[in-house]
Amino acid sequence: MSSSNYCRKHRLALAVYNTKLRYLGLVSLRQVKGGRVAIYRNTQLCHVTSFNWTAALIVSADRSAYFRSNADEDKCREFSVSRAFEMK
């Protein structure tokens, strides 16, 4: 199944899958409408769960978010958001 078909089947409005990102950088994102959020298999991606996605962003009947197999939060302690901007 292609990634676009997978997103439609599971009603995903935002999916971040299998990247080498360390920080999402979605500083202007305020709402996710019309679907779920899935962020998974991003082994270097830090601070995914430090933000309350379901309460603040998801405007939908199904306010669900799925986070699996991202960077371990213990490994992310030395990586701060301010350092992410310095690394550009």
Image (cartoon, rainbow, N blue to C red):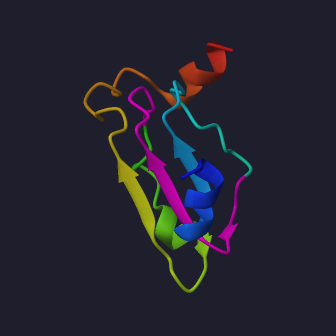
Q: Is residue 35 magenta?
A: yes
Magenta range: 29-46
Q: Residue furthest left?
A: 74
Q: As displayed, is residue 68 above or below residue 64?
A: above
Helix, strand or loop: magenta stretch: loop
Residue for point 39% across, 52% down? 67
Residue for point 57% across, 25% down? 82
Image coords of residue 38 (percent x, y): 49, 56
Q: Residue furthest top?
A: 87
Quarter of the image with the C terminus in it? top right
Write down the quadrant of residue 75 in the picture: top left
Residue for point 62% across, 59% down? 5
Q: Is residue 64 magenta?
A: no
Q: Is residue 47 left or right of residue 3?
A: left
Q: Residue furthest bottom?
A: 61
Q: Nearer the viewer, residue 30 or 14?
A: 14
Q: Nearer the viewer, residue 62 or 8?
A: 8
Image coords of residue 29 (percent x, y): 70, 54
Regarding residue 33, the answer to whether it shows in the image is yes
Image coords of residue 47 (percent x, y): 43, 40
Regarding residue 13, the answer to whether it shows in the image is no
Q: As displayed, is residue 5 above or below residue 44?
A: below
Total number of numbered discs in the rendering: 0
Q: As displayed, is residue 58 above or below residue 1?
A: below
Residue for point 57% across, 51% down? 15
Q: Residue furthest front?
A: 1
